[in-house]
Amino acid sequence: MIAPLDLPGDPASHRVVVAMSGGVDSSVVAGLMKRAGYDVVGITLQLYDHGEAVHRAGACCAGQDIHDARRVAEHIGIPHYVLDYESRFRDSVIDNFVESYLQGETPIPCVECNRSVKFRDLLATARELGASALATGHYVASRADGDGGRALYRAADPDRDQSYFLYATTREQLDLLRFPLGDMGKAETRALAREFGLAIADKHDSQDICFVPNGRYTDVIEKLRPDAAEAGDIVHVDGRVLGAHQGIIHYTIGQRRGLGLATGEPLYVVRIDAPNRRVVVGPREALATRTIILRDVNWIGAGAMEDGREIAVRVRSTRPPQPALLRREGDAISVELFDGEYGVSPGQACVFYDSVDARARVLGGGIIKRAAALTDATEIAA
């Protein structure tokens, strides 16, 4: 049988650590690695105090998931370990998530979790165990790039593609990472789960942020930072004070519903002025932008990150890549969107691809620092 990983020689000579979340995807990966003949070790991370989230549908990494991962490992006959990463997860992910919201951003904790906890700390553990690879259940593909390293690509199934959340992966990490589901669809994965006789073959997919047990992220922020929900003004882009709010953490860029304003015109959250505790609102056109300024940029493309390079970008995980121009002046990096965009939110990711194709290569990306407005309207209330 052909081994599903790019590892030389006899599969039995290679140890493969599988990150097992307790879900269908990672369980199937473990089954595939075992069937291929690798020396497989399953590892599940305990990332937070499970408490009430243990049996909640839609929450990942909870106590039930650890139990499910253990049962799968037992069923396919591999050793399984649970590692307590709670303090690392709190320091690297939860604390950053809270601080980002307090700065008026809308962060993506899964990006930071992949970058630091899973692909830094867990990868280090895999190396300590003598593993040749760390395999995960992400829907993304990686292949040898011809230069002695590996490149990251969008998954075959565009509805499952998770490349947006993995742009911060480094070249060094990619050398050890493997993603066996990158060329498969969810239906095929579930079929394999049934073939392997896994009891979790029809288990629901996790959807919520794993450390938000009730689906309300503001509860987590207020628990960790009781002073987070400070009241302030809701201000129109023309400078008029339209009302009051009970904390900027309750608002996101592009939000229209729940503003509590009766102005007779549709208004959207255009900007969050965290230092002054103001929520700036305006018409939809005030959300338009073509230029996005980035921070914390990671580049994994071939060659150098050059100014003026034509690329494709995604500023939301649910949108396909769109053509853009990469701009770099020293340490300042931005992208110019050919077709423009509405409601770009600081704290979200802007991910680079080499084209708009369905199987495009991931070139890297960065965190959105701010979006430059097409008009001066949003600067009136600054």
Image: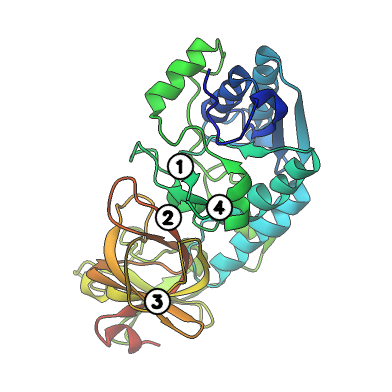
Q: Secondary structure at mark 1?
A: loop
Q: Residues within 10 Å of mark 1 (few under 14, many from 20)?
A: many
Q: Secondary structure at mark 3?
A: strand
x then y, percent, for residue 173: 62, 52
- Calculate the distance from the C-alpha at mark 3 to the C-alpha at mark 4: 29 Å
Residue type at mark 2?
Val
Identify residue for label 2.
Answer: 362
Give the residue displayed 79% in from the left and 38% down from the top.
129
Q: Residues within 10 Å of mark 3 (few under 14, many from 20)?
A: many
Give the residue displayed 55% in from the left and 36% down from the top.
6
Q: Secondary structure at mark 2?
A: strand
- Calculate the distance from the C-alpha at mark 2 to the C-alpha at mark 3: 17 Å
Residue 33 in view in this figure: yes
Identify residue for label 4.
Answer: 148
Which quadrant holds residue 200?
Answer: top right
* Label pair 1/2, CB-CB below 8 angstroms: yes
| Sequence-wise first label, 1 or 2 | 1
Which quadrant holds residue 186?
Answer: top left
Identify residue for label 1.
Answer: 140
Report the front residue among 119 and 203.
Answer: 119
